[in-house]
Amino acid sequence: MRLDLSLGFIQVWRRNRDVFMKTWKTNFLPPVLEPMLYLLAMGLGFGALVSPFEYRGVQVDYIQFIAGGLVAIAVMYGAFFECTYSTYVRMHYQKTFDAIVATPLSVEDVIVGEIAWGATKSLINATIVLIVITAFGLVTSPTAVLIPVVIVITGVMFASMAMMFTSLVPNLDSFNYPFFLLIMPMFLFSGTFFPLTVLPGWGQGIAMLLPLTHVSNLVRDLQMGYFDIVDMLGLVYIVLLTIITLTASVVMMRRRLVR
């Protein structure tokens, strides 16, 4: 199958950006307030019941541990919801895609533009969370400047995964399946709120298959100033999965749109 992709996808990205800027105040509040509420409730509240524990050979407080997980969650949620519910509304109800492909832009330009915007939305949300945890004094290493690079790569990955589901679902309600069967398990069992070492061996093995696990590890380790072979393997896993899901999402979504 020949894919007709050009730099025209930037125009689709710009269109979504312009719409976002019209309502930026509404979109700005949730990613600011949500991590603050988590840090207050889980970090300062529940965390007061948890003694400092060992992570990477040093003692860390619970609030510092979950901070990196909150950034990773923001990446996943920002990309997933933008490229599922929002993309589906633009495609099916607003007929935005029909209007765009009536121009010189191709179907592939529309798909990649949507994925690029989903990754951008996750970058915006996760960067806001990163600023919040920095303000709380939870970023302890200059290696944290590399976190946005991880956010961009994983934003494309989660946006592509979401687009694959968008290419398959018959209606909006069907997004409940990937949310509760994939996104929610990753939210809970990817080392975001507790170290994976507390799980049994089989549970740790399953967790290592979840992409959010590697995102959480990378963000947390860069936040604290660590990077070893485990992080390198996790980064390779993420890059390979990004390439696979991006390619698959373009092919699958093209089939739906030209059907």
Image: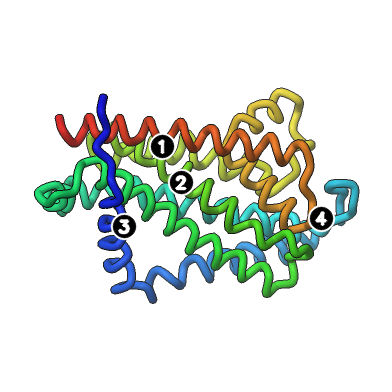
- The x, y position of residue 165, in whole percent, is 35, 35
Residue behind mark 4: 50
Q: Describe the element under mark 3 as helix, strand or loop.
A: helix
> Residue tagged by mark 3?
13
Mark 2: few, some, or many residues within 10 Å (few <14, many ≥20)? many
Q: In the rendered image, which residue does mark 1 sit on?
A: 246
Distance of label 3 from label 2 (alpha carbons) = 13 Å
- Disc tally is 4
- Residue found at x 77% / y 47%: 227
Residue 65 is left or right of residue 167, and the answer is right
SS at mark 2 in the image: helix
Disc 2 and disc 1 in contact, CB within 8 angstroms: yes
For numbered disc 1, what is the local secondary structure?
Answer: helix
Rendered residue at 45%/54% (across/down): 78
Q: Considering only order in the chain, which callout, 1 or 4, is on the residue closer to the N terminus?
A: 4
Earlier along the polypeptide chain: callout 1 or callout 3?
Answer: 3
- Determine which quarter of the picture holds residue 251: top left
Q: CA distance from mark 2 to mark 4?
A: 35 Å
Residue at mark 2: 156
Question: Sequence-wise, which precedes: disc 3 or disc 2?
Answer: 3
**Amino acid, disc 3:** Trp
